[in-house]
Amino acid sequence: MTTATVTDAYREQIWKIVHSIPQGKVSSYGAVAQYAGLPRGARLVGRILSQLPSGSALPWHRVVNASGRITFPLGSDKYREQRERLMSDGVILRNDKIDWKLFGWDGSHGS
DNA sequence: GTGGAGGCATTAA
DNA sequence: ATTAATGCCTCCA
């Protein structure tokens, strides 16, 4: 079947990882991609998240870029939505930026 | 030495 | 060939 794509197989894997992010913490596209087995698939994670089906209930708002900032243009509806959801999770945005040292999730189980 | 901004590189669709 | 929910490197203040 050549109809399927590479991300098609990683799609569920990425969903699992994003859904594995604990509330109050955030991760980056590159980090999630790396955990999924895609060393340079940062954009793939973003693309997959953009193709999320309605009702996926996936905490995509806990995923930001490596800069700790929301990828959407500041002032955009999407940007506002993610920021609101992040604050709802207890994540504080400082200067529209996330303190990675406070909310950065390594993907590890920690202690 | 730290922080912010801009540009180039990389992969998948 | 073009676009994209990015990442990393380099330069300036």
Image: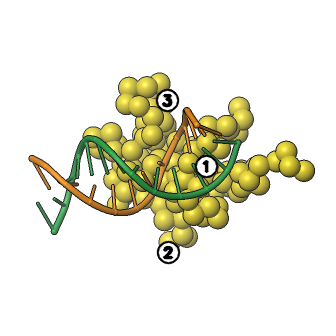
Chain colours: A yellow, B green, C orange
Residue A55 vertical position relative to residue B4 in the rendered view, above or below = above
Q: Residue under mark 2: which chain is it in?
A: A
Residue at the image point whose x is 61% and y is 42% from the top: A47
Mark 2 / mark 1, whichever is N-terminal? 1
Residue type pointed to by label 2? Ser
- Residue A27 visible in this rendered orientation of the protein: no
Q: Residue under mark 1: which chain is it in?
A: A
Mark 3 / mark 1, whichever is N-terminal? 1
Residue type pointed to by label 1? Leu
Residue type pointed to by label 3? Lys
In front: mark 2 or mark 3?
3
Disc 2 marks which residue?
A: A111
Q: Which mark is residue A44?
A: 1
Mark 2 / mark 3, whichever is N-terminal? 3
Query: Could you tell whether A33 is left or right of A27 in the image?
Result: right
Where is residue A69? Give x, y as percent: 39, 44
Q: Residues within 10 Å of mark 2 (few under 14, many from 20)?
A: few
Q: Are marks 2 and 3 on the same chain?
A: yes
Pick out the residue farthest to the bottom. A111
Q: CA distance from mark 2 to mark 3?
A: 34 Å
